Amino acid sequence: MPAPGENLRINSARLWDSLDQMAQIGPGIAGGNNRQTLTDADSAGRHLFARWCKDAGMTMGVDTMGNMFASRAGTDPAALPVYMGSHLDTQPTGGRYDGVLGVLGALEVVRSLNDLGIQTKHPIVVTNWTNEEGARFAPAMLASGVFAGLHTEDYAKSRRDLDGKLFGEELARIGWVGDEKVGARKMHAMFELHIEQGPILEAEGKTIGVVTHGQGLWWLEITLTGKDAHTGSTPMNMRVNAGLGMARITERVHQIAMSHQPNAVGAVGQVKVYPNSRNVIPGKVVFTVDIRSPELPKLEAMKAEVIRAAHAVAGELGLGVEIEDVGHFDPVTFDAGLVSVVRQAAETLGYSHQDIVSGAGHDACWINRVAPTVMIMCPCVGGLSHNEAEEISSEWAAAGTDVMLHAVLDVAEVVG
Ligand code: HGY
Ligand code: MN
Ligand code: MN
């Protein structure tokens, strides 16, 4: 005999259909998405999400960083709301599910509560955080970082994209500057459902990841300055080649991460070469180093070694070097009580599960600073993400959302 509520499930077909409809906005060129933050496509996705929330009987609030909060009333308006959310913005060659599953899964939880006629004591809020990816405007998790007090709003709105456009001007241009003060909202709890973006759950045959921790991260932007010169007529011993310096430092970043195994990663993802002409030795290169570890001592050691390596390579090649911190958060420990609630929900529903550390950064990593927070993960095919071929099954999407439904009901307190 199933326990009370054990068979409560969301509407998997409706969730999958909503994911498919959202994926039509800001399509990529290979089946994924290019719905970068503060673009017209981002705005269109926001409007679709807002319409769905209205149709589900929710009221929408927007803060001055464009964070969206759709509220479902509880029986006790004085009770702090239970939040669920993630992000609708994508990488330039992103998948359909990174972030989007967490926002539309949360919407599906509310839609299902409406269908089931379930009331909760605590209000429930579905959130879309602005600029989680940090692809267009660094750093990642920018708006949730302002909400949690890690960045000032002025800093965030002064960030520029590769074309020199300002975050604040682009947010105003798409018409999503709200009137709420960022960070004024207080939360009873915050849940973020997200695809794993790694291979562990699929490889282990587990349907649910109970996220106990998130690894820490540094983003270092390195500028190397050499001298533009002719690639044909300049003798090798007279070159001041910034491109060569970037290549050597990229290799050193890989070696440093490998020297701190297990639980250490490092790569260079964004490179801007100047003048980027086929027959000009690069006189300037600007590139971002991304290093991460769940262990704080390792993270700090890797950062120090990367900085030392950058100065050593610049010295060898006679290059100027500047290093700027453009993103950082320490390893995160999520709320132990909520971790237990998520684990129990997976047990009640009969889904296979395991504890896991998040390899990627998420808005939940910042919100964890200001409210009890936890994440729920589902597998993704081959662990692939930040790639248009990102894929999940509808069963995995539904399972993760079912777990969030049960966990939220546990914390929001069913009435009647
Ligand atoms: O960079 C990250 O880990 C996240 O995808 N923004
Ligand atoms: Mn994400
Ligand atoms: Mn992402």
Image (tube, rainbow, N blue to C red):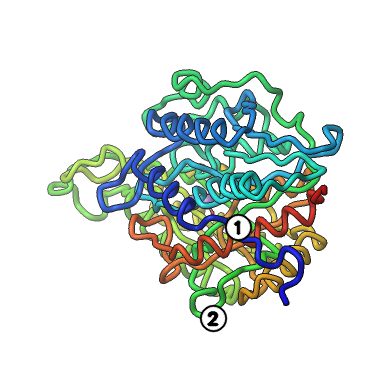
Q: x%, y% of residue 366?
A: 69, 46
Q: x%, y% of residue 182?
A: 69, 28
Queried on whether the Cβ of the residue with tag 1 lies below 8 angstroms from ligand 1, the answer reads no
In the depicted structure, whether residue 353 falls above or below residue 365: below
Amino acid type assigned to the residue bearing label 2 in the image = Glu
Q: x%, y% of residue 191?
A: 68, 52
Compare residues 18 and 246 and report the one nearer the observer.
Answer: 18
What residue would you read off at disc 2?
A: 204
Q: Nearer the viewer, mark 2 or mark 1?
A: 2
Residue drawn at the location 50% of the way across and 31% of the way down = 51
For the residues labelled 2 and 1, the Cα–Cα distance comes to: 32 Å
Residue drawn at the location 68% of the way across and 39% of the way down = 125
What residue would you read off at disc 1?
A: 303
Queried on whether the Cβ of the residue with tag 2 lies below 8 angstroms from ligand 1, the answer reads no
In the depicted structure, whether residue 415 falls above or below residue 61: below
Answer few, some or many: residues within 10 Å of disc 1's Cα (few below 14, many 20 plus, some between 14 and 19): many
Element class at badge 2: helix
Q: Residue furthest bottom?
A: 204
Q: Is residue 228 left or right of residue 165?
A: left
Q: Is residue 331 visible?
A: no
